[in-house]
Image (cartoon, helix red, strand yellow):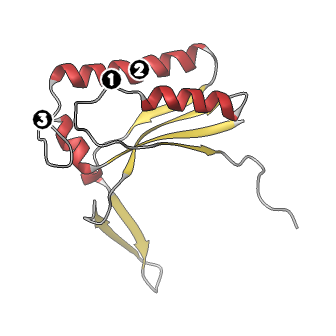
Amino acid sequence: MKYLVMVQGSQADYEAMTGRGSAQSPAWDKTQLKAMFDHMNAITEEVSASGELIDAQGLAAPSTTRFVTVDADGKPIVTDGPYAETKEVLAGYWVLDCASLERVTEIAAQVARCPVPPGSPDHPVVIRPIDETGPAQD
């Protein structure tokens, strides 16, 4: 079965990774940043070698987000993000094809053990099965 494994984060986390810490997220130094990237790359290499990897990406900072809706006439309304009320955002993901929920949970636990600076917020790793049933039939 295919699963989406999502890493959560916030704009404060992205800023902390560039050395601009805050009360919500302490500043990272180059050694801590390298440890995080090494950890995530090792997981990607492992699931690639096992044949479970379909795709994996880290995402740009939430400050680069665009929100697109439409008005009553169907014309696009585009606004920049993030908004203050947004606490967590998708920071990165893996799309995996795993034999079981237990296996993808093992991988998510590895992701959750990523090294971070002391005092960093604890963000969950979210697993979502990918629905491959196709469109509903009449």
Q: Position of residue 117 (x, y in %)?
A: 23, 30
Please tell me which of labels 3 and 1 falls first in the chain: 3
Quarter residue 26 falls in: top left
Q: Quadrant of the C terminus?
A: bottom right
The answer to whether the residues at label 1 and label 2 have Cβ atoms under 8 Å apart is yes
In primary-sequence order, the first of circles 3 and 2 is 3
* Residue at image mark 1: 37
Q: Quadrant of the N terminus?
A: top right
Q: Amino acid at mark 2?
A: Asn
From the image, tell me which residue sits under label 2.
41
Pick out the residue farthest to the top.
49
Q: Are marks 3 and 1 in contact (CB under 8 Å)?
A: no
Q: What amino acid type is highlighted by mark number 1?
A: Phe
Residue drawn 29% across and 43% down?
121
Q: In the picture provided, is 84 more to the left or to the right than 106?
A: left
* Label 3 neighbour load within 10 Å: few <14, some 14-19, many 20+: some
Report the front residue among 26 and 11: 26
Q: Which residue is mark 3?
A: 19
